[in-house]
Amino acid sequence: QWTTSSIVDEQVWRIAEQIGDGRAICGLSGGVDSAVAGALVQRAIGDRLTCVFVDHGLLRVGERTQVERDFVTATGVNLVTVDARERFLDALGGVTDPEEKRKIIGREFIRVFEQAERDLKAQGDYKFLVQGTLYPDVVESGGGEGTANIKSHHNVGGLPDDLQFELVEPLRLLFKDEVRRVGLELGLPATIVGRQPFPGPGLGIRIIGEVTADRLETLRAADAIAREELTAAGLDQEIWQCPVVLLADVRSVGVQGDGRTYGHPIVLRPVSSEDAMTADWTRLPYEVLERISTRITNEVPEVNRVVLDVTSKPPGTIEWE
Ligand code: XMP
C-alpha cells in the first residue's frame, strides 16, 4: 500500500542514492511539478541543489514573483534567476509550427541551464538535472509501452542529443493529484501546490502563429483577466485548468464604439479532468463568461472576440497549439 509519505521516503532515498555526493540543478517553471521535484531533491541533498528559474518571457503575469518569493520562502532553496527573454524571442522568430516551437523552447531551456551550470562551476561540479516529468508526459511523448507519440512535451521530447546532464526525474511514475499530495507532505504552500497546470513551453504554445513580444503582451493581458475573474468567482480550484489562447493568425471584423475593428479572437478553454489524460469542457456560469468576455474586449485593444471551446479530450487536447 503506497501512502504519500512512503512515496516521499522512497523518492528521497532514490534521489540520495542516484546523486550521491554530487550537485544538482533544478529548473523551476513556476508550476507545481518542478516545484515538487525541486523540494524532493532539496530534502534529499540540501544545499547541494541549486534551482534555476528561467524567465523565458513566455510566463503569465506574476509568475516570476511566485517563484522568487513563495517557493524560496517555503523551501529556503538556493535560487538563480536568468533573464532569457530576448534569447527565446529570437529563437522563436518566424516559427509557427507547434512541434518546432516545442523543440526550440526545450532546446533553449537546456542551453540556458548549461550556461547557468558553467556560471555555477565555482561552487563545484553540477552533473545532475532535475525535471518534473510526470507519468502522462512520459506516455504522451511515446515513452510508455505501446503508445503513440502525440506531441513532444518540452521536458521529454525536446531534449538535445548532446545533453550534458544526467536526469533526475522523481515524479516519473506519478499523476498530478499524487504530485500535489507529495507537495503538501513536503510543506509547500497551497499557492504552489494548488496551482493549475501550465505547460513548460508556456504562452509560446498558446499563441497560434508566430510568437512575438506584442502578441505575448496581448495574451498575457487576456489571461490575467480570465484568471482574475475565475478566482473572484471561486472557481479556480474547481476547474482543472483554463488555457487562454490567442489566435494570432486569425482576424475578424468587429465593431466597437463608433468604429470598425479588425482584431484577433481569444479562446477560453476551461476543462475538468482527473489526470489530464482525458478531460471534459467545464460548464462555467454564463455570468462569469460574460464578465471575462466584456473585460477582455474592453481592456485588451487587439482582441475583438472571446470564444469558448466546448470540445472534450479526446478528440481535442487540453492545450491549443
Ligand atoms: P494536452 O494539451 O496534451 O495537455 O491535453 C495535457 C496536460 O499537460 C500540460 N502540458 C504540458 N506540461 N510540459 C508540461 O509540463 C509540456 O510541454 C506540456 N504540454 C502540455 C497541459 O497544460 C495539460 O495540463
Image (cartoon, grey):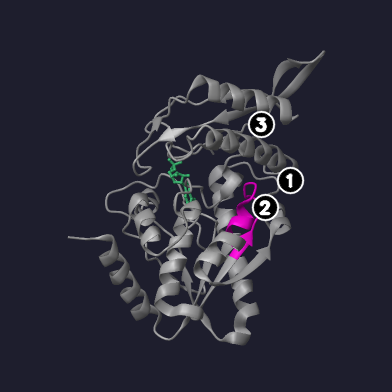
Q: Classify mark 1: residues with Cα within 10 Å, few (<14), some (14-19) or many (20+).
A: few
| Contact, mark 1 vs mark 3 (Cβ under 8 Å) | no
Most distant residue in the top direction: 258
Disc sitting over residue 57 in the figure: 2
Residue 310 spot, x, y in % from top left = 45, 24
Q: With respect to residue 225, does 256 lie above or below?
A: above
Q: Earlier in the sequence, mark 1 or mark 3?
A: 1
Rounded to the nearest angstrom, the CA distance separating label 2 from label 1 is 8 Å
Residue 147 spot, x, y in % from top left = 31, 48
Q: With respect to residue 256, does 205 lie above or below?
A: below
Q: Amino acid at mark 2?
A: Gly
Viewer-nearest of labels 1 and 3?
Answer: 1
Disc sitting over residue 249 in the figure: 3
Residue 29 spot, x, y in % from top left = 54, 57
Residue 79 spot, x, y in % from top left = 59, 70
Horizontal side of residue 238 vs 70, given as left or right: left
Please give the range of residues in magenta.
53-67
Q: Earlier in the sequence, mark 2 or mark 1?
A: 2
Residue annotated with mark 1: 213
Viewer-nearest of labels 3 and 2?
Answer: 2
Front residue (pair 275, 182): 182
Q: Residue at x 35, y 50 (%)?
A: 177
Q: Looking at the rendering, which quadrant does residue 134 occupy?
A: bottom left
| Contact, mark 3 vs mark 2 (Cβ under 8 Å) | no
Q: Earlier in the sequence, mark 3 or mark 2?
A: 2
Q: Classify mark 3: residues with Cα within 10 Å, few (<14), some (14-19) or many (20+).
A: few
